């Protein structure tokens, strides 16, 4: 048989395989950096990320070129420049195999990008890369892009605790980049750099957060004078799925309330919590945080994935945003408006405001929380933490029962009728609306979509009413 190992065709195949899959033997070498821009265009120097960031090593925007293949369009670097190995392996794993996949477009008729996100680990390069794939106009054609965010491999555990936030933020950045590429292609990357700074600062604040192990004696469960106020705080805290901001003028009192509420969070959620940090303002999607002397605007709060509770220690007041299913609709409205403002001539006038009002006061606590605090007060201090842990376990079990109940009913019909919901509340002994909303929030955390299944999607309900009124 003729030996074809040295034939021109075989050599070409070997070269292509080395380009796509990397060198054999598992040793990562630093290949030549690919062209930064397409031929004929001046190479743009790397952009700069905020100098004080410790979580993001760099950001890459790459695209598929029909001549060069996957290549870099723009790089944003931190204090240390990105190595050629990280850059080239990131863009290869981002775009090779994605051409023609069609998995990055929104549902038919929506016209919105639904980027596909994936993670790649490069231990030899000490890097973790999160990549979002999308299509956007470029040089008169629709081209496949990849937006890559590079994190240090040493922070893998911390990254996993906030992956959902990173994925969400990328899904918000990409529509803005698409609008800029379509409307202002010559200055799109310069304008997009302004959008990256808030993204990196937000991710960095969450990345370095976390609270140490807390002594139960350092909480407010021993202070009987604030029992009614504490009951309202815990009720709203659990109804907003643990997302709470504690504000006041005394750092010690604020941190004490943060410590108290942290016992209702999971270990993963506690990694996204923070005591008072001097000079720091509100951080969206930091689950539980303490603030001193920092005003909070509606536009900041609506950016969070979850509804939010605001606790004012000085005024002894508690307020919260709307329930989860309404909050999600309002958030989509805000994000849609934020994209339009990028190319709007009177952008300063297009400020967002909720037509429903964003906050509502919490006037009374849930009966189930009042009963819990009353029973806890009767116990000796040595048994209170155990009673608290048992209380949270019981609520979780009841939430699981609610999830199973809803699933069983939806197997029989597409929608939950009002009579079915009333029967369910009776079976689960949830006569109080506050108790029912609290348990629904817990159920949503363990089974996403439960809230909408039970309460309905406000956006769909509004469309039905509009169609009904227009028919007359």
Image: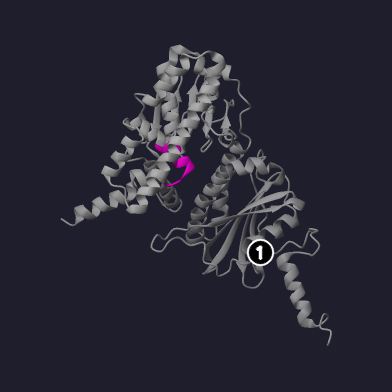
Q: Is residue 121 left or right of residue 296?
A: right
**For this rendering, which residue is in front, 222 or 288?**
222
Residue 316 in view in this figure: no
Please identify the quarter of the rendering in which residue 9 is found.
Answer: bottom right
**Residue ID at (65%, 73%):** 67
**For this rendering, which residue is in front, 201 or 267?**
267
* Mark 1, residue position: 71
Image location (x, y in percent) of residue 417: 28, 47
Image location (x, y in percent) of residue 154: 72, 43
**Residue ID at (32%, 30%):** 432
Q: Quadrant of the C terminus?
A: bottom left
Colouring rule applied to residues: one colour
Image location (x, y in percent) of residue 265: 53, 32
Q: Tell whether position 442 is magenta.
A: yes
Please identify the quarter of the rendering in which residue 188 is found.
Answer: bottom right
Q: Tell whether position 198 is magenta.
A: no
In the displayed structure, 292 sits above or below 468; it is above
**Magenta part, dominant SS:** helix
In the displayed structure, 103 sits above or below 464; it is below
In the displayed structure, 271 sits above or below 18; it is above
How packed is label 1: few (under 14 Cα within 10 Å), some, or many (20 or more)?
many
Part of the protein shown in magenta: 440-449
């Amino acid at each position: 048989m003729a030996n074809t190992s040295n034939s021109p065709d075989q050599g070409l195949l070997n070269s292509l395989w080395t380009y796509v899959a990397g060198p054999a033997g598992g040793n990562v070498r630093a290949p030549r950096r690919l062209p930064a821009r397409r031929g004929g265009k001046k190479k743009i120097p790397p952009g700069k990320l905020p100098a004080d960031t410790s979580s993001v090593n760099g950001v890459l925007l790459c695209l598929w070129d029909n001549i060069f293949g996957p290549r870099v369009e723009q790089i944003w670097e931190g204090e240390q420049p990105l190595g050629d190995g990280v850059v080239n392996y990131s863009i290869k794993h981002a775009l090779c195999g994605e051409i023609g996949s069609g998995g990055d477009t929104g549902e038919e008729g929506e016209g919105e990008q639904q980027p596909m996100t994936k993670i790649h680990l490069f231990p030899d390069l000490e890097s973790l890369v999160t990549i979002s794939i999308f299509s956007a106009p470029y040089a008169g054609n629709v081209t496949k892009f990849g937006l890559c965010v590079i994190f240090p491999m040493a922070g893998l555990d911390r990254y996993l605790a906030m992956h959902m936030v990173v994925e969400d933020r990328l899904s918000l950045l990409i529509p803005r980049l698409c609008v800029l590429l379509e409307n202002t292609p010559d200055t799109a990357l310069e304008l997009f750099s302004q959008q990256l700074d808030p993204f990196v600062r937000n991710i960095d604040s969450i990345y370095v957060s976390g609270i140490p192990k807390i002594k139960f004696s350092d909480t407010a469960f021993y202070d009987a004078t604030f029992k009614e106020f504490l009951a309202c705080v815990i009720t709203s805290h659990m109804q907003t799925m643990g997302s709470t901001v504690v504000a006041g003028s005394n750092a010690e009192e604020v941190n004490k309330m943060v410590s108290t509420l942290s016992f209702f969070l999971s270990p993963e959620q506690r990694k996204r919590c923070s005591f008072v940090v001097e000079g720091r303002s509100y951080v969206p999607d930091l689950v539980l945080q303490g603030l001193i002397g920092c005003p909070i605007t509606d536009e900041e709060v609506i950016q969070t994935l979850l509804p939010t509770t605001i606790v004012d220690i000085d005024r002894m007041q508690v307020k919260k945003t709307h329930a989860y299913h309404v909050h999600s609709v309002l958030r989509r409205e805000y994000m849609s408006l934020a994209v339009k403002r990028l190319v709007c001539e009177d952008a300063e006038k297009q400020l967002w405001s909720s037509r429903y009002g964003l906050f509502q006061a919490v006037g009374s606590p849930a009966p189930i929380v009042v009963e819990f605090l009353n029973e806890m007060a009767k116990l000796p201090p040595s048994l209170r933490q155990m009673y608290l842990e048992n209380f949270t376990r019981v609520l979780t079990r009841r939430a699981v029962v609610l999830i199973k109940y809803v699933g069983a009913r939806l197997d029989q019909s597409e929608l939950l009728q009002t009579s079915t919901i009333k029967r369910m509340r009776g079976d689960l002994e949830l006569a109080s609306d506050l108790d029912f909303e609290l348990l629904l929030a817990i159920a949503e955390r363990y089974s996403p979509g439960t809230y909408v299944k039970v309460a309905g999607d406000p956006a769909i309900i509004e469309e039905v009413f509009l169609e009904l009124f227009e028919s007359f």
